[in-house]
Image (tube, rainbow, N blue to C red):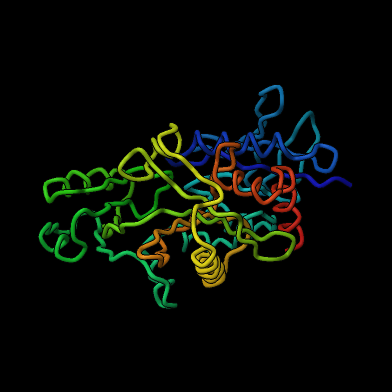
């Protein structure tokens, strides 16, 4: 009996269009012989199953079922392709846990923790993982630019606490640029963090659960034309992504060890893509993405291909790992 797989995509954040692209790629690459897969759009104004004729069928939120031509579809597993809220922050996964629906992501608490950059950094620091120096700010709090500069220095990065795809991030090079950067970040979130600039190459490390084991994928070096790996660099071709990264075997070993440790510390499962800056050869952890982009141009599929894992194998593995849990 073929399992019914709901590929959830869309979401309520600025990343909705990117998520719809990721979800469409997952749908395209899941074998129709092995699974019955369905595209489910989770949007602010509607939850719908979208069939191949683009016809929409409402999702019943009581049990996450759908009806097509009088037949009720009950899902065995949800493939999470929602970047941002409510997929990457764990909200919809808590609901799935309540109704007993298996999914391809880590448990909802782990997803919420990793999505909150401030909390995530606080946890990993306790285990000796190196990070940038941070300054936290909540909306409405008094802003003292001199105090910020004294702690993190210049240049510095101003980031929304809960946002992905580099939305709302700025690099402030002078004191005068800090306030506009803070305003921009507050448009995305009510909490922000301001981090010291780490000078060194940026390495992206994909860590996944593959065939019941933690697997570190070939690493990617980010070389951007812009000041940092922002939205343009990520999605509009303003960066070079070099896989495998041009690093020594010694640094590779160090990164592999730290990336595995971070995955375990955070009690992760499923997909993850973490950013590290190498400062004098020492990996500094920036953040973890738990619903990374899954389009053919995205980094995790690039890394999987380098490891000899096709998109179909990557997605089928995620489903099988979820069904076993």
Q: Quadrant of the C terminus?
A: bottom right
Residue 262 position within the rendered picture, expressed as x and y whole percent measured from the top left: 51, 68
Tell me if residue 108 comes above or below residue 228 in the rendering: below
Task: Identify the residue at horizontal 17%, vertical 61% (top origin).
Answer: 148
Q: In terms of depth relative to the viewer, which is nearer, 174 or 307? A: 307
Using residue 312 as the reference point, say whether residue 303 is left or right of it.
Answer: left
**Left or right side of 80 for 278:** left
Q: Position of residue 92 (x, y in %)?
A: 56, 52
In the rendered image, the vertical position of residue 93 relative to residue 127, given as above or below: above
Q: Position of residue 36 (x, y in %)?
A: 79, 40
Residue beneath the point at 65% across and 65% down: 214
Tell me: residue 262, above or below residue 78. below
Using the rendered view, name the quadrant where residue 54 is placed.
Answer: top right
Count of numbered circles in the view: 0
What residue sits 71% from the left and 48% below the top?
A: 309
- The answer to which quarter of the image holds residue 196 is bottom left
Furthest residue in direction top, as rendered = 53
Q: Is residue 279 above or below residue 203?
A: below
* Residue at far bottom of view: 127
Residue drawn at point x = 38 percent, y = 41 percent = 224
Instruction: Where is residue 249? Give x, y as percent.
Output: 54, 64
Left or right: residue 1 versus residue 312 is right
52 or 294, which lies in front? 294
Q: Residue furthest front?
A: 248
| 280 with respect to 179 (left or right) | right
């Amino acid at each position: 009996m073929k399992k019914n797989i709901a590929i959830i995509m869309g979401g309520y954040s600025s990343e909705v269009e990117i998520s719809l692209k990721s979800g469409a790629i997952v749908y395209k690459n899941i074998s129709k012989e092995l699974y019955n897969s369905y595209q489910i759009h989770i949007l602010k104004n509607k939850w719908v199953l979208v069939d191949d004729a683009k016809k929409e069928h409402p999702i019943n939120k009581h049990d996450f079922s759908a009806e097509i031509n009088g037949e009720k579809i009950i899902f065995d597993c949800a493939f999470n392709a929602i970047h941002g809220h409510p997929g990457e922050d764990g909200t919809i996964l808590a609901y799935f846990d309540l109704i007993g629906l298996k999914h391809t992501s880590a448990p909802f608490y782990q997803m919420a923790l990793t999505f909150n950059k401030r909390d995530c950094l606080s946890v990993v620091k306790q285990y000796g993982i190196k990070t940038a120096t941070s300054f936290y700010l909540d909306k409405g709090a008094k802003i003292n630019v001199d105090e910020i500069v004294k702690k993190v220095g210049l240049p510095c990065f101003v980031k929304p606490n809960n946002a992905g795809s580099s939305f709302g991030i700025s690099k402030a090079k002078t004191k005068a640029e800090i306030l506009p950067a803070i305003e921009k970040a507050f448009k995305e979130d009510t909490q922000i963090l301001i981090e010291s600039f780490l000078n060194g190459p940026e390495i992206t490390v994909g860590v996944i659960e593959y065939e019941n084991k933690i697997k570190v994928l070939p690493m990617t070096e980010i070389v951007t034309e812009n000041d940092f790996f922002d939205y343009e660099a990520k999605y509009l071709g303003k960066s070079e992504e070099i896989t495998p990264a041009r690093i020594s075997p010694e640094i590779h070993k160090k990164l592999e060890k730290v990336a595995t440790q971070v995955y375990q510390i955070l009690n992760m499962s499923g997909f993850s893509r973490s950013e590290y800056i190498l400062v004098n050869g020492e990996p500094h952890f920036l953040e973890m993405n738990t619903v990374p982009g899954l389009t053919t141009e995205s980094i995790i599929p690039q890394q999987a291909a380098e490891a000899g894992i096709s998109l179909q194998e990557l997605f089928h593995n995620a489903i099988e790992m979820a069904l076993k849990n």
